[in-house]
Image (cartoon, rainbow, N blue to C red):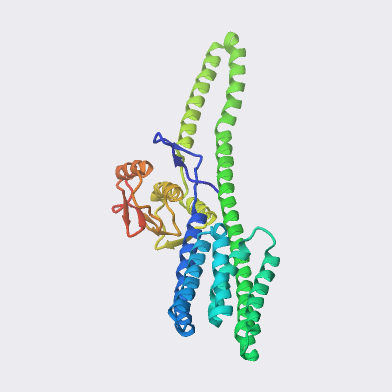
Amino acid sequence: MTQPASESHSGHRTAEPRVKVSYATSARGRMSRLNITTQIAVIIPVGTVLVVTDSRVWWEAAVLVAGVLVAMVAVVRWAKDDIRRFTVPLLGTSAAVWVFGALVSGSSTAFYSITVVGPLIVPQMPRHRIPAAVGLVAFVTVVGASRLLRPYENAGSTAFLFVLVPSAVMVVTLGFMFANQAFYKVLAELDEAREQESELAVARERIRFASELHDIQGHTLHVVKLKTALAEKLVRRDADRAEAELREIHALVGDTIKQTKELAYAQRRLNLVGELENAKNLFEAAGIRVRIIREAAVDERAGELLGQVLRETTTNILRHAQAGEVRITLAESGITIVNDGAPGDLPELRGLSTLRDRLAGVGGELTVAQDDGEFVTAAAFPHGVAR
């Protein structure tokens, strides 16, 4: 698998890529927003119903509302991955609300706050998570059971409302959050594996470039060495033949310089089929979905330039975009590449500007456009490829 050539700061193109993918950070941000939205959408209405149905005076309602607000803060901090900084105030407040509900106001639903806050915090702890979980369940159970010490309480209903239900909810919620934590760990491992794949793609490209450079210069230097030694021997015995050898050396060195420049500037002949496979492998290694749509067989005469457009666009997407999906559409004499990760401001794409001039010289057109978060690169030969 090869990597498309990239541009240096000076405008020159180099064969070594500089892939910088932030898909892991972007995915975490989207997951964070999704968690906040979905959980707040549940906490607010449920908390409101519990406050309305389980409070008799305003000060009981005020305490229960404080518990709901603490639960909301805990969800936001958890989604932003910094809940451990607020462990003490969040747990302390939610625990106080439950103690108040069980011992003072008789609000059996006051456990709601701590059964949200506790399961968010405990699985995030660096160690002693299981003892902490057991301690949390024990605390909820003991506080609820202390309600039984009050006189004139119905033991059966009190045990059910203040002991069994809160303890069961805490156990279930803790189990769910431990499973959720394991799921996030798997996601993190997948992100790390994808980044390693991208680094391997860069390493493979370096090996490919080194191999091509060796193919170009290694053979030439070996031949030059032999011909120079031969010319040295012939210079006194056969000057004409020695002169011919030196001319061949001169021509060979000139051709090698040309090939090396073409390699460094990514102007060697490209194969569109190979570039399609290369782009597909690179995008998939970066965690980007790829769709290839073949409307017609591509004209062979257009294949090389279209391959250069695809290679340059692949580099630009990997360097500048935050794409989740790329669509590549092939027509008889054209190619269109669309990605959904266009940045806010269109970056300067000098490589595409150079290709636009090259295509125009042979009757082609290269257009770029940005619309509604999508960046479109399209190259076509409306009247066929000029010779």
Question: Could you say which is closer to the camera, residue 262 or residue 109?
Answer: 109
In the depicted structure, whether residue 187 falls above or below residue 57: above
User: Can residue 78 be seen?
Assistant: yes
Q: Residue furthest top?
A: 236
Identify which residue, 250 or 130, lies in the foreground.
130
User: Residue 140 appears in which quarter of the rendering?
Assistant: bottom right
Vertical relation: 217 (above or below) 309: above
Residue 105 at what x, y percent from top left?
53, 80
Give percent across and percent down for residue 209.
55, 39
Q: In the figure, residue 372 lies in which quadrant?
A: bottom left
Give above or below for 227 relative to 211.
above
Please give the name of the residue rendered at 56% of the width and 28% of the height, measured from the top-left corner.
220
Asked if residue 43 shows in the view, the reply is: no
Horizontal side of 262 relative to 211 (left or right) equals: left
167 sits to left or right of 89: right
Question: In x, y percent, where is residue 72?
Answer: 48, 68
At a point 46% along the width and 40% down the height, the residue shown is 268
Residue 27 drawn at (x, y percent): 50, 59
Q: Residue at image x 58%, y 16%? A: 231
